[in-house]
Image (cartoon, grey):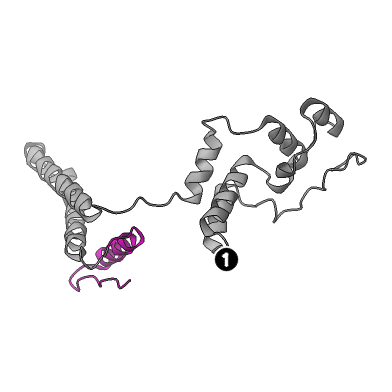
Amino acid sequence: MTLPDPPSDLSRGEKKAFRNLVKTLADRGIDPIARAGLVEEYVRTDARLTDLRAAEKQVEKGSKLAASRAVNVATMERRRLHEAIFKGAKKPEKTVAATVHDAAVDKDGEKDARTEAWRKYLYASVRTSSREAIEAAHGPCPLVAILYRSHEEEVGTKAILKAHGRRVVPREAWNELREACGGTLSWEARAPKFYNPDQDNL
């Protein structure tokens, strides 16, 4: 899809905002060329609003009301333009970071107690329980506990694979998951030894 160029009289920052906005429109299924005028107006209004807010802080108390009114008018205009620009756009795909955050919240109690107990044992720097004690309390170690070091990594990885199917997963997706999960994914670190009932240390 062809993206429109920003007007030449925009500032460098405004041109960047213009390009980001038209790219977002294209990603959301909207022809950015058809709404380039609205995008330009939005960018100019946003810049003017920034200036108005800065000016509002500088005015004397007697002129504060007029300055605040100008800020409110510009804010409402920017909101109107934003709604017009994205009218009919498809909803954005959920980011990996948002998926991981929702998994961490665990609103629906999706975390399995047995899996979490084994994860704590497998990946703990200092083990406070024996393998026998964990197995007696929670049962055999599930494979998913070995594959993913956290519930968040499990959910995030499955979301990435579902989104990309058989295609090559872009590096950015793994980077986002890596950052959301604390820096290192289980398959990048030293993996724990596969569960063996005759072995004391996994």
Q: Is residue 138 above or below residue 65?
A: above
- Circle 1: element type: loop
In this picture, residue 171 sits left or right of residue 65: right
The residue located at (87%, 43%) in the rendering is: 196
Name the residue type under label 1. Val
Q: Is residue 48 above or below residue 112?
A: below
Q: Quadrant of the C terminus?
A: top right
Q: How far from the left and from the top, in percent, is residue 76?
A: 15, 45
Can residue 129 be spotted in the picture? no
Q: Is residue 92 above or below residue 23?
A: above
Numbered range of the magenta stretch: 1-30
In this picture, residue 133 sits left or right of residue 64: right
Is 165 one of the magenta-colored residues?
A: no
* Residue picked out by circle 1: 168
Can residue 88 be spotted in the picture? yes
Q: How far from the left and from the top, in percent, is residue 194?
A: 82, 47
Q: How far from the left and from the top, in percent, is residue 183?
A: 61, 51
Front-lying residue, 4 or 11: 4
The residue located at (65%, 52%) in the rendering is: 185
